[in-house]
Amino acid sequence: MNSEFTIAVHCLIVLASAPDRVWSSGSLSRKVHTNPARVRKIMSALRRNGLVTTKEGLGGGYRLGFSSGDVNLALVYRTVSCEALKLNWCSDDGAGDPELARVRSVMDQAFCRAETMLETYLEQWTIDSLLEQIKCEPDVPISDHFPVSAHKDKSTKYNINRIGGEG
């Protein structure tokens, strides 16, 4: 996972919190504490996938392109994170090294399974569910607002605990 995912989610939360407002890249960047050029790059990916709409010209900017309860974090993750969990640690192609080929194969399978588990978990969260958590009282632990579907799915909760997450 990379920081573009977090920035994209934060931008979508900002847009969802004021759905009638059009946000410029400058105003969004100040809200999410990120460079405006980086925000524009991320918002461009979100726009290409219909998650935001744009208004050009004076007073232009970004708005949500969907109902905030309809889009889950897995979709946002797939939109902005390309091969996020697959790591490349070798500086050369390792031609002629059969052990390296086997290690790469095993690691590719591990990363593929981990990414599938991550996406399954992220499917349980929508922009609306995050907004609800943000609005909850500060003394109420966030874990008390864990997505309802995750409480029902014991295997997801077990897997999240296995990989060191909350649950």
Image: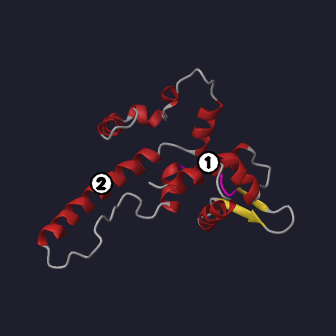
Image position of 161 with respect to 96: above or below: above
On the picture, is 93 further left or further right than 127? left
Magenta-colored segment: predominant secondary structure: loop
Image position of 54 with respect to 140: above or below: below
- Report whether residue 71 is seen: no
Q: From the top left corner, tell me how far across and down residue 141 is, in percent.
A: 52, 24
Residue beneath label 1, please?
10
- Dot 1, crowdedness within 10 Å: few (<14), some or many (≥20)? some
Q: Quadrant of residue 156?
A: top left
Tally of marks: 2
- In what element is the residue under mark 2? helix
Q: Quadrant of residue 110?
A: bottom left
- In the image, farthest residue toward the front: 91
Which segment did they paint magenta? 64-72
Q: From the top left corner, tell me how far across and down residue 109 is, in percent.
A: 25, 59
Asked if labels 1 and 2 touch by Cβ distance under 8 angstroms, the answer is no
On the picture, is 99 further left or further right than 83? left
Image position of 158 with respect to 59: above or below: above
- In the image, farthest residue toward the bottom: 95
- Dot 2, crowdedness within 10 Å: few (<14), some or many (≥20)? few
Kindly identify which numbered label has been placed on residue 113. Answer: 2
Q: Quadrant of residue 88?
A: bottom left
The residue at the point 72 percent across, 50 percent down is 30
The residue at the point 39 percent across, 49 percent down is 118
- In the image, farthest residue toward the left: 98
- The amino acid sitting under disc 2 is Arg
If the image is split into quadrants, where does the N terminus sit? Answer: bottom left
Q: From the top left corner, tell me how far across and down residue 3 is, in percent.
A: 52, 54
